[in-house]
Amino acid sequence: MTTATATTPGPEGKELPLRERKRLRTRRALVEAALVRYARDGFEHTTLDDLTDDVEISKRTFFRYFASKEDVALAPEKEFWAAFLDVLREAELSGPVLGVLHRALVTALERMGEEWERRFAESRRLVERIPALAAHSLQHCAETSGDILELLSVRLGPLAADDGGPDGPGMDELRLRIALEITVAAFRCALHTWSTGPADAGRAELIALTGRAFAAVPGSLDLMARPAGHG
């Protein structure tokens, strides 16, 4: 376990109180222990006792930080989506919604720390091969999508006339939800390519893959189906 310094940064660059620094150290130590254990021993063969023994805490203390074995392994992903929500709360939102969401993803990725990048890569590689973690990731993504949709509905306001005209009422919300689902799908495609590719692929590569996925969206919507055997 690493030793905290007196310069551990907090919000707006302020030094965190000692108690909060200890909490962060314990949380990070649990995440590190889980990532190492799951990769080495397997998710199913790792017990909560293993994790708590590694960090020298009780199970009761573990549950102050995480709800389950899955939760601790997905901590880097959850940290990212929390940062993404922060970006959406702070940023000036204008222009095409897909572009807004793409820029927010990139900004959130750029804000994350160097150690987070390593933990996130290790976590995503585990998600790719452990069904229980993949399911937990999808569940959290669905929950976060609801939070994002609620935030965007407030911050963006009406996107177009929604007065029961030819399109019918409720089209703003439907369009916004579809735009968000496209965003999540594009990002997950980028994540899959990134986490199953070279182990040394860094954040810049993930940002580039995310841009490539978004660039593919228009062509995907216009993709034409043809019967097999017809050129």
Image: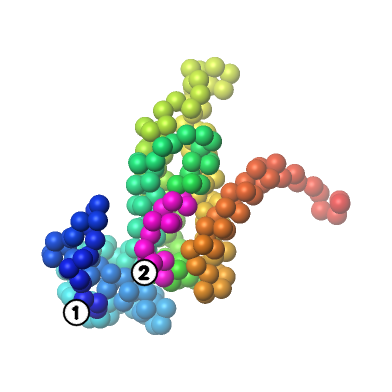
* Residue 33 in which image quadrant: bottom left
The quarter of the displayed image where residue 150 is located? top left
In-front residue for pair 221/22: 22
- SS type, badge 2: helix
**In screen coordinates, is 73 left or right of 67?**
right
The residue under label 1 is which amino acid type? Glu
Q: CA distance from mark 1 to mark 2?
A: 22 Å
Name the residue beneath numbered marker 2. 115
Residue ID for mark 1: 56
| Quadrant housing the N terminus | bottom left
Residue ID at (27%, 72%): 30
What amino acid type is highlighted by mark number 2? Answer: Glu
Residue 63 visible in rendering:
no
Relative to residue 90, is residue 169 drawn left or right? right
Q: Which residues are magenta?
A: 105-118
Q: Nearer the viewer, mark 1 or mark 2?
A: 2
Residue closer to the observer: 21 or 222: 21
Q: Position of residue 167 (x, y in %)?
A: 57, 22
